[in-house]
Image (spheres, rainbow, N blue to C red):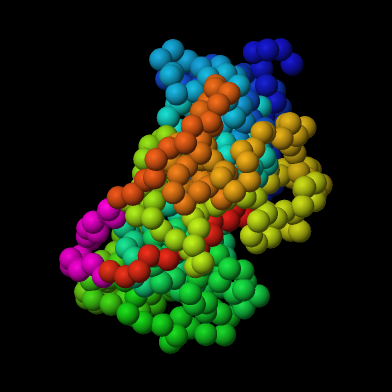
Amino acid sequence: MSEHTMRAVTVKEFGGPEVLTVEDVARPEPLPTEVLVRVHAAGVNPVDWKTREGQGMAGLQTFPLILGWDVSGVVEEVGFGVTTLAPGDEVYGMPWFPRAAGGYAKYVTAPARQWARKPATLDHVHAAAVPLAALTAWQIVVDTAKVQAGQRVLITAAAGGVGHFAVQFARYLGAHVIATASAARHPWLKELGADEAIDYTTTRFEDATKDIDVVIDLVGDTHDRTSTRSLKVLRPGGLLVAVPSGVSPELAQAAEAAGVRFTAYLVEPDGARADEDRRPDRRRRGRRRGGGDLSAGAGRRGPRPRRGRPYPRKDRPHRRRLITLASSSEQQRVLRDPPLPVPARTPRGVGALHGGRGHPVPGLAGHGRDRLLRRHPGRGRLRVDAPVRGRGPERGPVRGPSTSTTAGRTRSGRLSTTC
């Protein structure tokens, strides 16, 4: 393999795991404003295997196709005009979505603004499991629903990849969070910040709750008409965010008849969140019970995947978020690079944020309540920033009737990265 080629997992026709093949392909070159990233780990999401089977984002792809959107790695080269990143920077992101990003390869190119610096608390394997799920939850809770303190938020499939992030973000913003999941997941969800948990296997959520301001439906109408049932629990003027199935004409008609707002949603790349002051504590100082702020750390809450262990079933590649492939015998295995040296950490109890204060996943756990201690890229020193305070966002309608904003005390749950 020459310096102009690389190993990649390609798809030349839609189908099962057997259509995945490893071969040598041309190595991409970064265009102006782009960076070349050497991939150390790539995450697997439901959209990956759905697209491989001809569903998901299949209609936007061409063959040969290299799947993979969640990526963590190291910047190898930068194109002309790039000033935010440099060779050697550890980054992660979800580039190009919904177009093909080519994450199942040794190298990936994408605009520099679609990458964020990797948190020092996460290794590449765990960092690659974060971008799509965390950005989806963040963009729904903060940008789309504009969740406010005191609002009642119902999250279906709350124990899933997107759901467990949404629980934490909504709670951090001060919402009263109601989560649906199997009973075995209830203790973990309450630890993340859910105020109530409903066992969907024994109880219909429309029979257990009401007067909801925002429903984040991560199940969709394709399963038990979950989006349509959600209309029954929304208060007049409430908002339904229908994620996997979107909003059908029938659902839109039913929502308008019920006097509630509704919108479909699809995540988009947003690496700039790591460098802009958009984090919710920029607007309000959210607190979890007992004080303290958001923190992140792989395995600190919830299950952590065992490295080197295969998926339990080939048709459930979203259950553990490590990159996996299927051989011709349909036996799955985990592929990853040798581990990198453990990054230096800031003193315990003060922590730091990676690359700025705007990313939905803070960099190091336990930053102080009054000041933030940050390590600046390329410098061997730390700087203490002043406290950040501000006002919360104003809530605006998405579609349908307008509604008023309810206020309440800000409470939050601890942020936890689960792969």
Q: Residue at x 64, y 60 (%)?
A: 301
The answer to whether residue 402 is magenta is yes
Q: Is residue 191 above or below residue 272?
A: below
Q: Which residues are the magenta region?
A: 391-406
**Residue 8 appears anywhere in the view:** yes
Residue at 34 percent across and 55 percent down: it is 284
As rendered, which of 271 and 14 lies closer to the eye? 271
Foreground pick, 213 / 219: 213
Residue 125 x/y as whole percent: 68, 41
Query: Is residue 339 placed above or below 82 in the rendered structure?
Result: below
- Residue 121 in which image quadrant: top right
Q: Is residue 215 rendered to the left or right of residue 298? A: left
Based on the displayed image, in which of its 4 quarters is residue 320 positioned? bottom right
Q: Tell me, yes or no, if residue 10 can be seen here.
A: no
Image quarter for residue 149? bottom left
State the image coordinates of residue 195 (x, y, percent, origin top left).
48, 74
Q: Position of residue 43 (x, y in %)?
A: 62, 44
**Residue 47 image offset from top left, x and y in percent:** 54, 49
Q: Is residue 317 left or right of residue 83?
A: right
At x 50%, y 49%, the residue is 368
Seen from the viewer's position, the closer of residues 84 and 377 is: 377
Rendered residue at 27%/74% (across/down): 254
User: Number of numbered discs present?
Assistant: 0
Q: Within the magenta stretch, is there residue 62? A: no
The secondary structure making up most of the magenta span is: loop
